[in-house]
Image: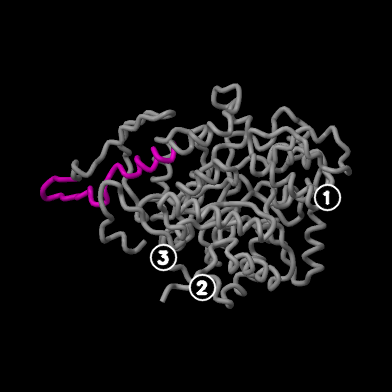
Amino acid sequence: MSKKRQIRLGAFLSATGHHHASWRHPDTNPRGGIDFEHFKKLAAIAEKAKFDAIFTADSDGLWTRASDKEVVRRDGHGPSFEPITLYSALSAVTRNIGFVATASTTYNEPWHIARKYASLDLISGGRAAWNVVTSGNPDAALNFGLDTHPNHGERYRRAAEFVDVVKGLWDSWEDDAFLYDKASGIFSDPEKLHVLDHKGEFFKVRGPLNVPRSPQGHPVLVQAGASEPGKELGARIAEAVFTAWQTLEDAQAFYRDLKFRAAKVGRDPDHIKILPGVYPVIGRTEQEALDKKEQLRTLIDPKVGLSLLTNLGGLDGLSDYDLDGPVPQDLPETNDNKSRQSLLLELAARENLTIRQLYEWVAGARGHRVIHGTPDSIADQLEEWFVNEAADGFNLLAPTYPAGLVDFAELVVPILQKRGLFRKEYEASTLRGNLGLPIPASRHGTSVPQRKFA
């Protein structure tokens, strides 16, 4: 008998919450982004609730454009920890929860990424994941000696080769290469050490890596992107996919498409967990949830709202239009977040939104699905997508931290558990084990018995 399918949950952490004005909320710590105790508390809440992983986004530049001083003055999306550094510290004060850290293939080198993530994976006992991104922030180019951001297609070609190189480096050592035999003086078997010697379009990397494989083989690979190149990359390399959809039908179409593409390249579709983002506003009554939404809406500064549409959604030039007029549909195509630009334009047309209404919506969920209501209503809405194969789980974007995460953990998780949709205890000590993903065998040899605990 096959094991019953269960929801996977990630907590998308941020400084004060996912509403862009959450730093102004009376219950948040505006310095949270650089407060380790803040993240330590959030990790403990998520682990107690048995979340699979916590996740942080990252950027190789400011989230806002430094030249726009008025937006910098008012935008609370400010300083933050580098994810690998943060998770290395959090791994020492947690036991089971996984760590999904973002790093760009556009402004890094494969050796650096391979070594950092392999190190985190060993430090945490097999709980690391790499969120593979191609950088949607055009200003990042200016921090790396470039005058312009590489085009979308080139970024994805580079990403595909980048991941291949990193995976090759992660397999530098076979699982049983280290003997540690003090009596004979034999530390390792050199026949089980492999030089990658990669030469490709973008990279020339000899190897081998100076970090061995971890208890889960290698870090879980996570990816996001609904453009055609993004879906092709995800189908080929991703083991979890973060995505953003508004309707059940669109989410189902993406789910079927990505699983089909994975099967087409010889992968087991069950080995890709599709996790749409969801922004839940929870109240003990429906009116309480609506009041929470309205309280945050009133805190949005119009200048910050417009910058969000530009920087996140690629909707440039909107300051020339009436904020209370319709969203123009003939804006130039972006070179940055193509799938998010399409999503926002389609949403604005479908819902007949004004520019102000669109940025008010984006300020909360950044293009992800917004749900609100009582704990039972929230659980119903998640269950509908899960049982109808629109999702394997969800990446939770709480409006404010810590309150939004506490509400979900204490009010919604018990309902999902009672319905048999979510675990009551962790199944394993590794992220792969908890996600139900296989340990990848080394390309040079098979896994060894001690890996059974993963």
Give yes or no for contact between labels 2 and 3 (Cβ–Cβ under 8 Å). Answer: no
Instruction: Please give the residue where the numbered disc 2 appears in the rendered image.
Output: 424
Residue 268 magenta-highlighted: no
Residue 146, x across and y down, in percent: 56, 23
Three-letter amino acid code of the residue under disc 2: Lys
The image shows residue 230, relative to residue 334, as above or below, that is: below
The residue at the far left in this view is: 184
The image shows residue 403, relative to residue 176, as above or below, that is: below
Disc assigned to residue 428: 3
Instruction: Please give the residue where the numbered disc 1 appears in the rendered image.
Output: 352
Q: Residues within 10 Å of mark 2 (few under 14, many from 20)?
A: some
Camera-near label (3 vs 1) is: 1
* Residue 82: quadrant of the picture: top right
Can residue 314 be seen from the camera position used here? yes
Three-letter amino acid code of the residue under disc 3: Ala
Query: Residue at 60% across / 24% down in the picture?
Result: 148
Residue 163 magenta-highlighted: yes
- Identify the element where label 1 is drawn: loop
Q: In whole angstroms, how far apart are the C-alphas of marks 2 and 3?
A: 12 Å
Query: Residue at 69% across / 56% down in the picture?
Result: 246
Q: Residues within 10 Å of mark 3 (few under 14, many from 20)?
A: some
Residue 446, x across and y down, in percent: 26, 54
Residue 239, x across and y down, in percent: 47, 53
Residue stretch in magenta:
162-187
